[in-house]
Structures are given as C-alpha cells and as structure tokens.
Amino acid sequence: MPLINNLFDRLVTRNKKLIGHWASVYLDYTNEMNLISSRLVASPAMRLDNPALFTGTSVSNYNDFIYKWIYEHNNGISSTGLSLLSVVNFDKIRTSASFKTVARKVIAAPDFTNYCNLNNQWHTIIGRNNPLRTNRALATCNPKELASTVDWSKFCAVLTYLRKHCSYTITNPAPNWFVWNQELTKWLDSKLSVERSTYTDRKKYYVDRNIFVWMLYENDPLTPADKKYFL
C-alpha cells in the first residue's frame, strides 16, 4: 500500500474515535454554509443581514453568523491559533457595509478572486491582515477544494513532508495558501480514489480528507526545525 494511503487508513479510517466528533461538527457547519450560499445564489438581491437567510441554521441573525464565521476561536473547522482580533476591530469588520458586500460574494462564490478581495477589504478596514481567520473563512465555504489547516507554516510543513516522502510536487511556484491548497486537495483526491469510492456521501469524504491534512501535521515525523521552513 502506498504511504499516503497507509497514512489515511491509520490517521482517518481507523481513527474515528479520535476525529469523529470534529468530523461531525465540521460536516454540520459546512453543510450549513452551503445552504446559506445556495440561498444567496438563488436570490441575488438578498442581503447578508437578512434574517431569512439563516432559517434552519444554528444562527438566527447576521451578528451571530459573523461571530461564528470570523471571530469564534474554534468554530468547528479550525481554531484561530494566535491570530489576535480585538473586539474593536471585529466590530469594525462586522459593521462595515463594504465588508458585508465582499463577504456575501465570498460565501456565494468562494474562489481565488473573492479570497483576495476579502483579504484586501479586511486590511482596508482595520489596517492589518489576519490570514488564519480569512483562510478559515474560505475553508468553511469551500471544503471541496480547501483543507482547513489555515496556519501557513503548518500547512507548509505538511507539504514538506509530502514532498520528502510521497513524491508530491508543487506546480505553481508562487507561494499562496489558496492556490497551493487547491493543488494539494486535487492531488489527494487522485491518490485517495479508492478510499473516496467507499463514501456514499462525498461531503463526508471532503471533511475526512481535510482533517487528514491536519492529522498529517500533528503526526508527521519531521523535526521541529523542519516544520519552521518550507523546503
């Protein structure tokens, strides 16, 4: 069995007791976000602060929604680690009309262009970036293409391990979390085709695959020094 498949079997398939709760919460939240996204796509005039948008979800209004999506330390997708966002700056983001416009576009179409627009708007509003939070926001909206290891250094540590031990190759030379994440999930899908075929619900596979990326970081044999740099 190739190493990548062996790792998936050990860290995911035979590890449900450890990751099962996280996977369940992860799936519920991404399904919820997918419902909200489909409503925005179906109703182009619907505003992000329209309470009807959140019917049947775990939140009832825009403020609760944005708190969970942006501010909450651990929202079921990933934690924000040491990415500090003050209450004052969060309120600036939450109440900004321009942020609501960009956020709506991100949720309806979580692509690279809107990812860049979100980061740019974030910096315009508070004068700094919080990539862990904006990366997590996109991972929540696009679990099919984006794994939820949102810390750049930890994400690169996984790529380092895969390059060293699983013949992984990066095709886009420009370092970018979104682009390299798309490449990684596409590669994993090709390598895990047999495992993927055992899932009756493709969304559950995406969740397990994304958790797998984090489990690789937590369990890989790279030294701490290796983890500091992308080689």
Image (tube, rainbow, N blue to C red):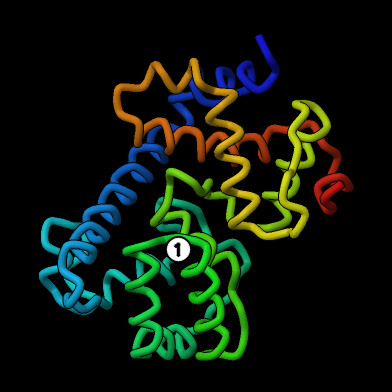
**Quadrant of residue 167 within the rendered picture:** top right
Q: Is residue 32 left or right of residue 141?
A: left
Residue 192 vs 146, above or below: the answer is above
**Quadrant of residue 220 within the rendered picture:** top right
- Residue at label 1? 137
Q: Residue at x 13, y 74 (%)?
A: 51
Q: Quadrant of the N terminus?
A: top right
The one of 87 and 199 positioned closer to us in this rendering: 199
**Quadrant of residue 24 within the rendered picture:** top left
Q: Residue at x 61, y 54 (%)?
A: 179
The picture places residue 91, in percent across and down from the top left corner, at 40, 87
The picture places residue 148, in percent across and down from the top left corner, at 52, 49
Residue 139 vs 208, above or below: the answer is below
Q: Amino acid at mark 1?
A: Ala
Q: Residue at x 12, y 56 (%)?
A: 56
The picture places residue 147, in percent across and down from the top left corner, at 53, 46
Q: Residue at x 40, y 57 (%)?
A: 75
Element carrying mark 1 = helix
- Give the crowd class for mark 1: few <14, some 14-19, many >=20 residues within 10 Å: many
Residue 5 vs 81, above or below: the answer is above
